[in-house]
Amino acid sequence: MPKLMEEEVFMAFATYATVVLLKMLLMAPLTAYCRFTRGAFANDEDVALKPAEERKKLVRTHPDVERVRRCHLNDLENVVPFVLVGLLYALTGPQLSTALLHFRVFAGCRIFHSISYIFALPQPSRALAWLVGLLVTLSMAYSVLSKVLVL
Amino acid sequence: MPKLMEEEVFMAFATYATVVLLKMLLMAPLTAYCRFTRGAFANDEDVALKPAEERKKLVRTHPDVERVRRCHLNDLENVVPFVLVGLLYALTGPQLSTALLHFRVFAGCRIFHSISYIFALPQPSRALAWLVGLLVTLSMAYSVLSKVLVL
Amino acid sequence: MPKLMEEEVFMAFATYATVVLLKMLLMAPLTAYCRFTRGAFANDEDVALKPAEERKKLVRTHPDVERVRRCHLNDLENVVPFVLVGLLYALTGPQLSTALLHFRVFAGCRIFHSISYIFALPQPSRALAWLVGLLVTLSMAYSVLSKVLVL
């Protein structure tokens, strides 16, 4: 195993990055599940096996499907930058405890964000989960720039 | 050249990651091509040079453009996690043959996924391409977590 | 600090990658700002505190919000591949001056792209900013494949 993966900060990063990426990947099967249970598909070929008279009606949007898709897109917009900035941050050699704090808060926020989005919990639960996650990424970005700035 | 790029597993990862990212990047020019040939634009300023009476009609959606855009978004949702999880996976020092199997199956799946999406091939061709690609990423994520778990 | 972050090319990559990711992250608060000022929300729970008769009208799309969202999605489609390909490119040990040229042109293009998208500058300003940014990523991808190809 290469040396990077012997450093504890990098191992912690690898763990949390994989966890939040797995959480993001789970949104796709959830979208598929909603499409089937709600009968709302995006493509003509997806409903080719249904009776001809039903097909037209099944290619449509459904509020539950759109909700999961918005949640998925929000993950893309937030989880991917976290992993990319977090990778650079882990390479700058932060304190293990500080790094773990960042990673744990972010992972907790994003899991709670998905729950509050999918179950439509009252605001500001979702907004706060999103904001705190964003602040974690900004804090890591600041830490990277303060250590390696080469313009 | 730094040491990472002397390891064969990492070179294989770099190759396949670049290939699938290039495939994803190609979706943008394809969207542009469809917008021009179908006459379906997203912004008023994009049709400013057209005759005034045509402009309003050209800012619209078109099924072919939306199809390419869905394919592009699906790439974002699947290719980006593959590259990120794959990077961590390559750093954990897997067997070259196992790693190559993962990378090759994923690249093949995503190329076939795009073909089956754009040409609207009968299902379950697209669904299978998506599912097998997802399973490859999940397999790499499992491998990473089983080697480096630091919570 | 691990050795990677002592190499100047990698430090330059870390700087520019963080800058363009920060730019991308800023699109989310901008979307939120537009949603509040234009009164156009995506979810029922987001307007729960408004008077009952106003709620229905506030869950809607608005051209300004959709414009910022398209700009955000375009960032996802272009900035994320740049950072991923750029990471591999930086690891192949390019000349510092060549690498800096790639990173600077891309960062400039994407900042100008967002300005031209949000303020709806006349075309082809936005199209050119997008195209040159794409060419930078393609150039780095070509450089990676020419150095590490392992199929």
Image: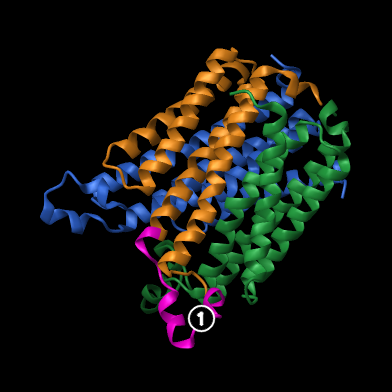
Chain colours: A orange, B green, C blue
Q: In which quarter of the image is residue A57?
A: bottom left
Q: Where is residue B2 in the image (x, y as percent from the top left)?
A: 83, 27
A111 versus B111 height, above or below: above
Q: Is residue A104 above or below residue B84?
A: above
Q: Quadrant of residue B58?
A: bottom left
Would residue A110 be visible to someone looking at this image?
Answer: yes
Q: In what element is the residue under mark 1?
A: loop
Q: Mark 1: which amino acid?
A: Lys
Residue C57: percent from left, percent from top: 19, 58
| Segment colored magenta | A44-64
Decide which of C62, C128 is in the foreground and name it: C62
Q: Which residue is drawn at 66% across and 40% down?
A: B84
Verify whether residue B44 appears in magenta. Answer: no
Q: Position of residue C73 (x, y in %)?
A: 49, 51
In the image, C61: left or right of B37? left
The disc numbered 1 marks a residue on which chain?
Answer: A
In this rendering, the answer to whether A40 lies above or below B20 is below
Q: Where is residue C112 in the image (x, y as percent from the top left)?
A: 50, 44
Local crowd size for mark 1, using a 10 Å CA cut-off: few (<14), some (14–19), many (≥20) = few
Rendered image quadrant of residue C99:
top right
Question: Which residue is under mark 1?
Answer: A50
Q: Which sits in the foreground, B22 or B74?
A: B74
Q: In this view, does B31 lie above or below B54?
A: above
